[in-house]
Amino acid sequence: MPMLAVVAFAGLFMPAGPHAAAAADRGLDYIDTSFENASALYWLTDPNGVVHVYLNYEHERASVNRATLHWHFGLEGRPGADVTLILHNFDNIWNGRPGSPIDDRTISVVSPDGRNWTVVKGRKTHDNGFQLDLNLHSGRLYVARIEPYRLSDLDALKQSIAANNLVAVETIGRTVQGRDLEIIRIGRPEAPRRVLLRARAHPWESGGNWVIEGLIERLLKDDPDARRFLDAYCLYVMPIANKDGVARGGHRFNVRGMDLNRKWDAPPDPDLAPENRALERWLASMIATGRRPDLAIDLHNDADGKLHISRPDIDLDQYLAAMKRFEAMLRGHTCFSEGSTGGSFRNPGSFGEGLLERFGVTACILELNANWIAGLDDYPTAANWKNFGARLADAFYHYFKDEP
């Protein structure tokens, strides 16, 4: 018998002949990854018409750790076609331990235009894939893990607030690839208290950016409450720590393989982690001029949504009392309900623990649940996260107001 030829066209891999033509008519023509924040991937269509999407792992430098957590791509095909996708490569290794970021709670979002997103439920497959059953209503559909927030979205935010005299944007350094890193100040430097927020140490975790945008918009609303808030505290924001990763559709690490939420227990390497080096130098200058942040929060996304309160081997009485008060303010003034880490929880080298140990800053990590907001009984959306950010303005005010 003659050998069977194989044809590869538009991601379709199957025997040549009439079956290939039938497969090409099953709905999907192309997966587009040419745009900002899109995922690196390859894809195949099996003989049953199921599209298998293989996301590229990211690897941590000098470590066994690897991650795939982000997906963002565009489907192009026949309008009205039903398409089944199975995403692969979720055999992650985190802190040296194997684990999957996919479970029965995992959601995705879809959009016809890349701006207006709808939540869709998928399911975990027997081989640790993630299946989505979709319809190409208009022939074009964007698919993402959670609502994307891109560098262009940050640029639009900065442009929209640039003329406000309560806003200052300071470039504090550059990423590995040379992108500017900024601190956005909202309020007056002479305010009695200071809050520092950082987001996007891990590129896939866009929820923190929507929270920050909602918080900034609330503080600049110029009503009696906003003026009262800014009389009490000044906000400092590092909006996107891992800009290179966000631009290229990364998962967890910077382009030199560094986790920017690790190794805060020592001075950052200026070549491997200039993003952390820039923030540490800015923080040291603030402390040297008597403007130490009174509260610092690193915003993340995960599947649990807890407030991470670390317990390094130092005197913790004052810190734990402050965190207890902060958690109470979150519960009382926002939709936060997931609780905090207790007992002897530690996360050595993380932003929260490093700033507490090395700089005496009351710092923590706030995880935003990427699958479900229990306090709202609703899915996480940009609108819901912006609302949370707006309510944070009040939570910060009462946190400082109720200081002992």
Image: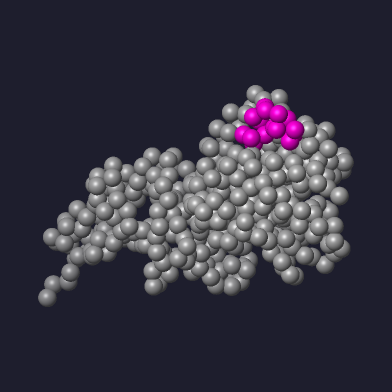
Percent coordinates x, y for residue 158 in the rendering: 61, 32
Vertical position of residue 377 compared to residue 397: above or below:
below
Q: Nearer the viewer, residue 340 or 8?
A: 340
Identify the residue at image location x=26%, y=58%: 12
Q: Which residues are magenta?
A: 216-230
Q: Is residue 74 left or right of residue 48?
A: right
Identify the residue at image location x=47%, y=62%: 105
Main SS category, magenta section: helix
Name the image quarter holding residue 305: bottom right
Name the image quarter holding residue 337: bottom right
Percent coordinates x, y for residue 139 in the rendering: 28, 44
Percent coordinates x, y for residue 172 in the rendering: 72, 40
Identify the residue at image location x=60%, y=45%: 388
Vertical position of residue 353 compared to residue 168: above or below:
below
Q: Nearer the viewer, residue 191 or 352?
A: 191
Q: Is residue 275 left or right of residue 192?
A: left
Vertical position of residue 375 compared to residue 57: above or below:
above
Q: Is residue 361 left or right of residue 73?
A: right
What colouring style does the render use? Answer: one colour
Percent coordinates x, y for residue 78 in the rendering: 24, 47
Identify the residue at image location x=36%, y=42%: 112
Let me know if residue 201 appears in the view: no
Residue 61: in magenta span: no
Q: Nearer the viewer, residue 261 or 322?
A: 322
Q: Quadrant of the N terminus?
A: bottom left
